[in-house]
Image (cartoon, rainbow, N blue to C red):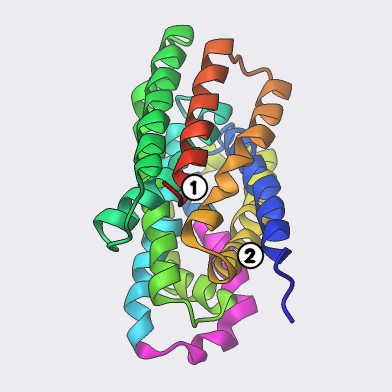
Amino acid sequence: MKNPNIKWIYLLILSVIWGSSFILIKKSLLGLTAYQLGALRTIITGAILLLAGYNKLKTIPKAKWKWLIISGLLGSFIPSFFFAIAETEIDSAVASILNSLVPLNTILLGFAVFKIASTKRQVLGVIIGFLGTAILILKGAELNPNQNYLYAGFVIASTLMYAANVNIIKRYLQDVKPLAIAAGNYVFIVIPALIILLFTDFFTSETFNNPALPNALLYITILSVFGTAIAKVLFNKLVQISTPVFASSVTYIMPIVALVWGVLDGEGFSYIQGLAALLILVGVYLSHIRKI
């Protein structure tokens, strides 16, 4: 008999892992460009998952491969670059809070694309969540005039892609093993990542002579192993044993972990931004409730 509480254990583990990934991205950017980071993250993760899950690929039905390609692009490939680009301009803690829009977007896309009905309370949650997002971005731009908060758009776009991905996994890949999904995702995105890396001047003396490179490579390796490879398998399993909205609720706890890391690293955070973050979480909570 399956333990009904196991989903909460998955949720907590993922929250800690992914909540720590924002500071790892920030530290990796000290020695890598955003495109190098995104490409290396994809390549390292792909190597790990394909080594671990190569034998699982033959168990995937042919009809599922198109969804694995889409899932890989939306859930892994594009966001790995978008988050890196975003954190060249905005703080890691702010990026993590904006990432908590995933459950809201899961509701919106579930209704608009996958025809999953929403309640009045969920609609109210969406409105409150987006209000909190607007305040967070505007106040952040005011407090940090040297940061370009238009780059928050990369995070918001990624939350839409994550939301689409979780719905795809639940609807079309429910019967595929979690490791097979993760490995199948990377079959198609490792090669494009390698091509991008070749065009980023990574393999140059200037890059290899950068004193910040060794630490950056250490951070990106930790991020790839734990924040992507292991977390992907855990998340795919969580989606299958729960619901899309519950699985995306991992973003409830992630900002807390990321905020702690950000404050320890000297990032500024005002009480108004704190209230905006609270608004986002209230909106997410309301959107999570199914009853009217």
Residue 124 percent coordinates (x, y): 37, 35
Residue at image position (47%, 69%) is: 186
Prevailing secondary structure class for the magenta stretch in the rendered image = helix
In this view, the residue in front, 203 or 110, is 110
Which numbered disc covers residue 288?
Answer: 1
Q: Can the viewer see residue 78 in this picture?
A: no
Residue stretch in magenta: 42-62
Q: Residue 44, located in which quarter of the rendered image?
A: bottom right
| Local secondary structure at mark 2 | helix
* Mark 2 or mark 1, earlier in chain: 2
Amino acid of disc 1:
His
The answer to the question of whether label 2 and label 1 lie on touching residues, with beta carbons closer than 8 A, is no
Residue at image position (54%, 18%) is: 275
Q: Which residue is mark 2?
A: 234
In the rendered structure, the answer to whether residue 262 lies left or right of residue 90 reads right
Residue 37 percent coordinates (x, y): 51, 45
Vertical arrangement, residue 140 with respect to residue 28, above or below: above
